[in-house]
Amino acid sequence: MSAKKHGHVHHSKTTRDILSAERVLTTAGLKSGDIFLDAGSGDGFISFAASAVVGENGKVYAMDVYPESVVNIKKETEEKGIKNLDVAVADLTDKIPLDDDSIDICVMANVMHGFVENDEVEAVMKEIGRVIKQDGVFAVVEFKKIEGSRGPPFDIKLAPQDVEDILTQYNFEPVSASEVGPYHHLVKGINKK
Ligand SMILES: C[S@@+](CC[C@H](N)C(=O)[O-])C[C@H]1O[C@@H](n2cnc3c(N)ncnc32)[C@H](O)[C@@H]1O
């Protein structure tokens, strides 16, 4: 699996306990009726919050390479009778099973540092850029680059400027960098295709 082919192994951890999904989504600008992608969804806590925001006229896609996460999200979705959330196993470095220009807002939370470490940024950004609409939003959440704090090793953590450089390189215009809790920042980019 490409997510594990180099040094950094992405773990299917969740940041549910230390990151507010609502704060992430408000900062990203999610609204009712939007089509939303949770890229590397983990246990789906951001997807479930997004499902409530986008409502019955919107749609949420939760995607993760780890099949067990997907099964759990599917189960929770059925148990709660949620109709606007689709979940799929997908390797973001390979193919995102969505049409071109189909997404208004994509959040990628605590995943990008692994792609950097594994030299998979180009493959992922090609797919992310393809599925997000022109002028759509890509919001990248990462652990603050603070030594000894929560998250991946310091050397792997991405500062806002690191994320902005990635966005710029792949035709996204960085428009804001915000704190989204004690341990996280969010950099927002607009797809200029
Ligand atoms: C640290 S977890 C973050 C999960 C969630 N976004 C959160 O913030 O709690 C990283 C997630 O990225 C997923 N992931 C890693 N490589 C991936 C890939 N190539 N395609 C899709 N998902 C991937 C992992 O399975 C894992 O669920």
Image (cartoon, grey):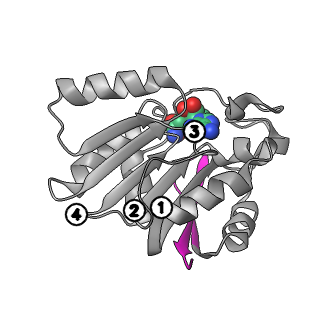
Secondary structure under tag 4 reads: loop
The kind of residue tagged 3 is Asp
Q: Where is residue 180 in the image (x, y as percent from the top left)?
A: 52, 54
What span is colored magenta in the figure? 176-193
Q: Name which of mark 2 and mark 3 comes first in the sequence.
A: 3
For residue 133, what is the image quadrant?
bottom left
* CA neighbours of label 3 inside 10 A, class few (<14), some (14 to 19), many (20+): some
Q: Could you tell me if the residues under marks 1 and 2 are in contact, i.e. CB atoms within 8 Å?
A: yes
- Position of residue 164 measured from the top left corner of the image (x, y, whole percent): 69, 68
**Residue 177 among those drawn in magenta:** yes
Instruction: Name the residue: 35% across, 28% down.
Output: 73
Alpha carbon separation for disc pair 4 and 1: 17 Å
Image spot of residue 156 (x, y percent): 80, 43
Describe the element under mark 2 as helix, strand or loop: strand
Q: Name the residue under label 1.
A: 131
Across and down, in percent, residue 109 comes to: 54, 46
Mark 4 or mark 1, whichever is nearer to me: 1
Is 78 situated left or right of 134 in this image?
left
The image quadrant where one finds ligand 1 is top right
Q: Quadrant of residue 176?
A: bottom right
Reading the image, the residue beneath label 4 is 33
Q: Which residue is drawn at 38% across and 22% down?
A: 71
Mark 1 or mark 4, which is nearer the start of the sequence? 4
Which residue carries the number 3 mark?
A: 91
> Mark 1 or mark 3: which comes first in sequence?
3
Whether residue 112 is visible here, answered yes or no, is: yes
Mark carried by residue 103: 2
